[in-house]
Image: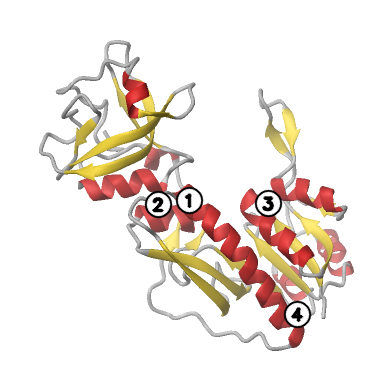
Amino acid sequence: MSLNVIFMGTPGFAVPTLTEIIGGGHEVVAVYTRAPAPGGRRGLDLVESPVHQAAKRFGIPVFTPKSLRNADVQAEFAAHKADVAVVVAYGLILPKPVLDAPALGCLNLHGSLLPRWRGAAPIQRAIMAGDAESGVMVMRMEEGLDTGPIAMAERVTITPEMTAGILHDRLMVVGADLMVRALAALARGSLGFSPQPEAGVTYAAKITKDECRIDFSKPAQAVHDHIRGLSPAPGAYLEIDWGQGAKRIKVLRAVPIEGAATAGTVIDEALAIGCGSGAVRLLEVRPAGKGAMSAAEFLNGAKILPGMHVASVSPAG
């Protein structure tokens, strides 16, 4: 049995789920996504979201309201007469009239093992915290922030060198399959829900610019987790002066190593930097205005020597 679905999502993470829903034989009657935003090479063009672009390829009507709290917008949403709404990283709050409009409710695909990491940045926060696993869950939405009952889940191991980008891409694929299976069960009337545990709630706040500066006063493992949790975007960074003024360098990959030096001090000529305990060796970086490159490539043009210091050890420095 196929369902009439409203799909609500914005970034590339949501596109595989939209594609799989269509491939599963369901009728996507409307797509809701964020309005086009300035972008392009010079930031002068209005760029449609990845979900918007995908919906156009499939010939699905696209709606881009700035808010869902307007009565006319809510009436238009209800007029689609959908069986269910599927929400994947949409970016707007769904008020009660919208949550109540689909006959079978609203299902959300969330990139964490709820109740851990409710909120905006669950993938980055899981890695930054050093979690050993993550996953995706399908839940029924309610008015609270990611508080609804859980229907289905898939767990994914976070390996020691996994970055947020790698985990994002893994969960994107696993999540698309999970949502299609959830819709199949919903269509059969066999999709059950269980309340989230009350214990273990954590919140994945949006990543701020201040958090991206690397704090080398922390232990090497925590610095490593911070770097990989922000890679490839927005990117953890340091600032260092090798005779040309302080330059900002984003660090995309690093590895914790044995070493003892004052936090923030360059230990050797292969970009090892001391931490609060231990050290990290930088493996891949992105200098300002340039693309990603290996540490060896970077050092071909940057004379960074043992004893040099990063410009600031801590975000508050």
> Residue 80's quadrant in the figure?
bottom right
Please name the residue shown 77% across and 64% down the image: 23
Task: Measure the alpha-carbon separation of dots 4 and 1.
Answer: 33 Å
Q: Is residue 289 left or right of residue 83?
A: left
Q: Position of residue 283 (x, y in %)?
A: 33, 35
Can I make out residue 206 in this image? no
In the drawing, what numbered circle is on residue 10? 3
Which numbered mark, 2 or 4, is in the foreground of this view? 2
Residue position for label 1: 166
Task: Measure the alpha-carbon separation of dots 3 and 2.
Answer: 24 Å
Task: Measure the alpha-carbon separation of dots 3 and 1.
Answer: 19 Å
State the residue lying farthest toward the top.
243
> Residue 29's quadrant in the figure?
bottom right
Compared to residue 34, the image places residue 289 above or below, namely: above
Looking at the rendered structure, the kind of residue marked 4 is: Leu
Task: Measure the alpha-carbon separation of dots 1 and 2.
Answer: 6 Å
Name the secondary structure under disc 3. Answer: loop
Residue position for label 4: 104
Q: Is residue 118 left or right of residue 24?
A: left
Label 4: how many Cα within 10 Å (few below 14, some 14–19, many 20+): some
Please name the residue shown 36% across and 52% down the image: 128
